[in-house]
Amino acid sequence: MKAEDLHSEFEKAVARVNNYLEPLPADLLLKLYAYYKIANRNFSNPGSKTPLINAFKANALIQAQEMSQEEAMRAYVDLVTRELPK
């Protein structure tokens, strides 16, 4: 897949998540969070006011830290395709 196609698919998947109205499981949200941050090369610290949430987010990032930007985009798209009903 070309880089432009992957980026387009990633943006569509992000929009799909952002427009999804049903609650999503916390483990799914944490994976999406980590993949999104890596795909966008955003390595800032989690910004929650709740330390426990920051810890979970940091852990999700640590688990995915070896992924490349492209791998993170592909993982995000695949997870959305597999887990979010249309």
Image (cartoon, grey):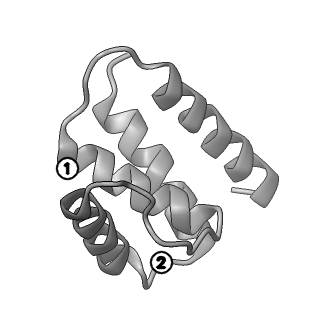
Could you tell which of marks 1 and 2 lies nearer the N-terminus? 1
Residue shown at the point (43%, 64%) measured from the top left: 46
> For residue 12, which quarter of the picture?
top right
Expressed as whole percent of the image width and height from the top left, the position of residue 57 reads: 31, 63
Q: Which residue is mark 2?
A: 67
Residue shown at the point (43%, 85%) measured from the top left: 66
Q: Secondary structure at mark 1?
A: helix
Q: Quadrant of the C terminus?
A: top left
In this image, 84 relative to 45: left or right? left
Does residue 70 lie above or below 53 as drawn?
Answer: below
Q: Secondary structure at mark 2?
A: loop
Residue 83 image label: none
In the displayed orientation, state which residue is furthest to the front. 49
Residue shown at the point (29%, 16%) measured from the top left: 22
Q: Residues within 10 Å of mark 2 (few under 14, many from 20)?
A: some
Expressed as whole percent of the image width and height from the top left, the position of residue 43 reads: 56, 75
Q: Amino acid at mark 1?
A: Asp
Expressed as whole percent of the image width and height from the top left, the position of residue 63 reads: 29, 77
Q: Quadrant of the N terminus?
A: bottom right
In this image, 45 relative to 7: left or right? left
Q: Which residue is mark 1?
A: 27
Does residue 43 lie above or below 50 as drawn?
Answer: below
33 or 4, which is in the foreground? 33
85 or 53, which is in the foreground? 53
2 or 18, which is in the foreground? 18
> For residue 13, which quarter of the picture?
top right
Residue shown at the point (30%, 64%) measured from the top left: 54
Spatial separation of the CA atoms under disc 1 and disc 2: 18 Å
Q: Nearer the viewer, mark 1 or mark 2?
A: 1
